[in-house]
Image (tube, helix red, strand yellow):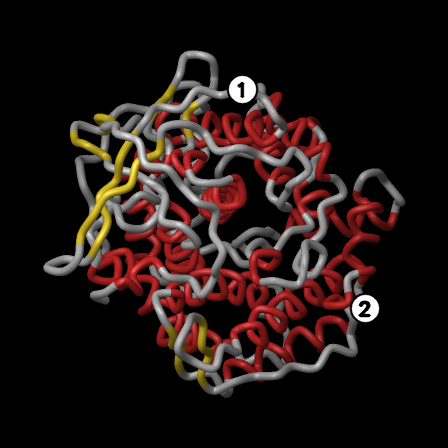
């Protein structure tokens, strides 16, 4: 169902360890828990916090202080969730409840307090028993993608709980969240393929991958992996990171738009890579660790450093309808104080698991520590785009990461190989007051074609 452009390369990764899979890997069961956190990860968190080790203790304190992480949280499920203009928007009920479920479930695994597991289960069961539809403007695709991958991650942490309705959770993900995300990656809301910036694709991609793993669906996971590598939309790795420089940096295309959305995109791509890694699929190392170079670029830029930017133009509009173009000619201005809880996961993968240099990502992670989660970064939806708590969840010592290669226990094994709705609702998010933009001419050749880019104000 997902479109793919180009053929998969046959070589093995450059700059990363090639991890060959046994012939039986394709038939192996998925690892559970195996989205953002494995059983080993959860055990490490619990042991480190019990020992009062730094920085885990500070990360756990950040979690326990969050109002969503309290066992007294009560769910507010809705039959239909709306996001976007022209509808009674109520999607905040969904993202607040999902973050409460995730935080309580994580707190349970660290502390062993049953009340938190019970709360997480009650929240997730309430939603799987009531939610039947996600509606709204084009923003409904954002809601399905963001809250789909987050619901799956919260549910993964309690999937073995005696009171958790696993079957109903699978139905909710596969019948409500997944169809919207799958359709977006296939048709992009009937828009030209470059109409939407990378984070739109990446929200959908995260949902597709998380749902495939949670529901043990090999075909769905394979679609997500292939889209990451070869998808036609701007969220595939070579379109999100179109220009690689020789200094360990690669341009993140959305840096030509604004800082907040670039950070969102890096966080989402990191989430996709981490979930895949925990099933034996190395997307972190794909195409000579292209994602590392893009993350380094965004980290340096967000810290106030100078970065290059290649002028480029993107086409926008509806297929058979309105059309236009937008151009980005330079990296946008940044606020060095802006952050999202995205860096600890990325820094620890590359520096601890792989022993690679990631100086700017490491600096960004140190500056953001201890990372919080939903509710710690403002009251609006943007503060809930990542599940967070990376200081607690992803910190690891070099000795703890030795031999921690992508484990070929998942249903799909991919080595790190080099790559060879109509109308102006298309980019609407219900957010007004976007920063003004001045167009400038420019075209950039990317992957054998012309990638046309420019900001659409206010759209994710």
Quarter placement of the N terminus: bottom left
Look at mark 2 in the image and give the residue it sits on: 113
Pinpoint residue 368: horizontal percent, then vertical percent: 71, 39
Question: In the picture shown, does residue 37 fall above or below 15?
Answer: below
Tell me which corner region of the image, top left, top right, bottom left or bottom right, holds residue 242. top left
Q: Judge by depth and name the residue closer to the eye, 330 or 301.
A: 330
Category of crowding for the residue at label 2, using alpha-carbon neighbours closer than 10 angstroms: few (below 14), some (14–19), many (at least 20): some
| Residue 1 in view of the camera | no
Which secondary structure, mark 1? loop
Q: Which residue is label 1 attached to?
A: 306
Q: Is residue 231 left or right of residue 139?
A: left
Front of the two marks 2 and 1:
1
Name the foreground residue: 428 vs 445: 428
Tell me residue 135's x, y (percent): 38, 77
Q: Quadrant of residue 161?
A: bottom right
Q: Horizontally, is 85 left or right of 306 in the view? A: left
CB within 8 Å, label 2 to label 1: no
Q: Decide: is 295 above or below 270.
A: above
* Residue shown at the point (25%, 46%) measured from the top left: 194
Residue 179 placement, left or right of 450 = right
Mark nearer the N terminus (2 vs 1): 2
Q: Residue at x 84, y 46 (%)?
A: 57
Residue 221 picture quarter: bottom left
Please report the residue visible at 84 percent of the width from the left and 38 percent of the height from the top: 54
């Amino acid at each position: 169902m997902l479109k793919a452009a180009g053929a998969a390369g046959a070589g093995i990764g450059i700059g990363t360890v090639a991890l060959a899979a046994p012939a039986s890997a394709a038939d192996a069961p998925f690892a559970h828990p195996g989205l953002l956190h494995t059983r080993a990860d959860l055990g490490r968190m619990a042991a480190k916090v019990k020992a009062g080790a730094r920085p885990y203790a500070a990360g756990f304190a950040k979690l326990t202080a969050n109002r969503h992480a309290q066992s007294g949280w009560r769910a507010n499920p809705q039959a239909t969730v709306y996001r976007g203009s022209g509808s009674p928007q109520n999607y905040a009920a969904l993202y607040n409840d999902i973050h409460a479920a995730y935080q309580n479930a994580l707190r349970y695994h660290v502390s062993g307090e049953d009340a938190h597991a019970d709360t997480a289960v009650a929240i997730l069961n309430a939603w799987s028993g009531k939610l039947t539809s996600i509606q709204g403007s084009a923003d409904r695709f954002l809601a399905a993608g963001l809250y789909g991958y987050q619901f799956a991650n919260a549910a993964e942490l309690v999937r073995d709980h005696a009171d958790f309705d696993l079957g109903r959770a699978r139905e909710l993900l596969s019948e409500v969240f997944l169809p919207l995300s799958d359709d977006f990656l296939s048709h992009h809301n009937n828009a030209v393929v470059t109409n939407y910036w990378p984070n739109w694709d990446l929200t959908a991609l995260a949902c597709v991958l998380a749902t495939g793993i949670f529901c043990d669906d090999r075909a769905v996971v394979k679609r997500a992996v292939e889209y990451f590598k070869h998808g036609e939309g701007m969220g595939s790795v070579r379109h999100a990171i179109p220009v690689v420089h020789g200094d360990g940096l690669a341009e993140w295309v959305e840096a030509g738009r604004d800082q907040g959305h670039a950070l969102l995109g890096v966080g989402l791509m990191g989430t996709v890579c981490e979930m895949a890694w925990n099933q034996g699929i190395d997307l972190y190392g794909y195409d000579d660790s292209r994602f590392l170079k893009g993350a380094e670029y965004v980290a340096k830029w967000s810290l106030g450093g100078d970065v290059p930017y290649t002028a480029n133009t993107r086409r926008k509009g509806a297929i058979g309808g309105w059309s236009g173009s937008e151009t980005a000619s330079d990296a946008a201005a940044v606020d060095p104080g802006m952050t999202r809880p995205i860096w600890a996961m990325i820094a620890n993968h590359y520096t601890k698991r792989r022993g690679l240099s990631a100086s700017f990502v490491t600096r960004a992670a140190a500056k953001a520590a201890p990372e919080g989660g939903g509710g710690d970064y403002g009251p609006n939806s943007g503060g809930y785009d990542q599940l967070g708590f990376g200081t607690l969840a992803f910190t690891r010592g070099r000795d703890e990461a030795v031999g921690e290669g992508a484990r070929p226990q998942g249903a799909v094994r991919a080595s790190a190989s080099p790559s060879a709705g109509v109308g102006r609702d298309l980019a609407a998010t219900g957010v007004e007051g976007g920063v003004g933009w001045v167009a400038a001419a420019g075209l950039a050749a990317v992957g054998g074609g012309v990638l046309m880019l420019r900001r659409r104000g206010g759209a994710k």
